[in-house]
Amino acid sequence: MDVQLKRGLLDVCVLAAIKNEDSYGYQIIKDLKPCIELSESTLYTILKRLEGAGMLTVRSAEHDGRLRKYYHITESGTRRIEDFKKEWREVISIYQFVTKEDPHE
């Protein structure tokens, strides 16, 4: 799979994992597991990139005596998910065209 395409898909997956409620790294990995396996290092690289792009914010809160980072989707992150949905319709259309059976075969 094209690296840029995969990167974009992973970004949107992470945003979707936090769109309904704030979450933290380990929980995001668990939530994404049915769809895709992510290593912690890959996830934290994505989270840092999304934070830098203004698509999520981070806050720290104490949990069991330790500080835990919680991630919150921003309006920009929500728009990215909506843009992805529109773009994906076009990708599906292209896929259907490419995989259409040739009547001459």
Image (spheres, helix red, strand yellow):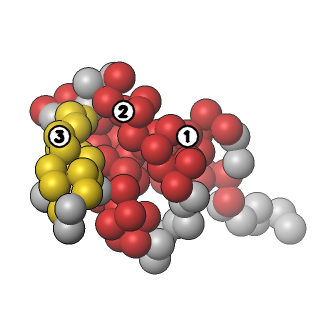
Q: Is residue 89 left or right of residue 95?
A: left
Name which of mark 3 and mark 1 comes first in the sequence: 1
Q: Is residue 105 left or right of residue 30?
A: right
Name which of mark 2 and mark 1 comes first in the sequence: 1
CB within 8 Å, label 3 to label 1: no
The dot on residue 15 is none
Place of residue 34 in the rendered image (x, y in percent of width and height, measured from the top left): 46, 76
Q: How far is disc 2 from disc 1 in space, using C-alphas? A: 11 Å
Q: Residue at x 35, y 23 (%)?
A: 52
Disc 3 vs disc 1: which is toward the camera?
Answer: 3
| Residue 103, visible in the rendered structure | yes
Q: How far is disc 3 from disc 2 in space, using C-alphas? A: 14 Å
Q: Which residue is mark 3?
A: 59
Specify the quadrant of the image occupied by residue 63: bottom left
Q: Which residue is mark 1?
A: 7
For badge 3, the amino acid type reads Arg
For badge 1, the amino acid type reads Arg
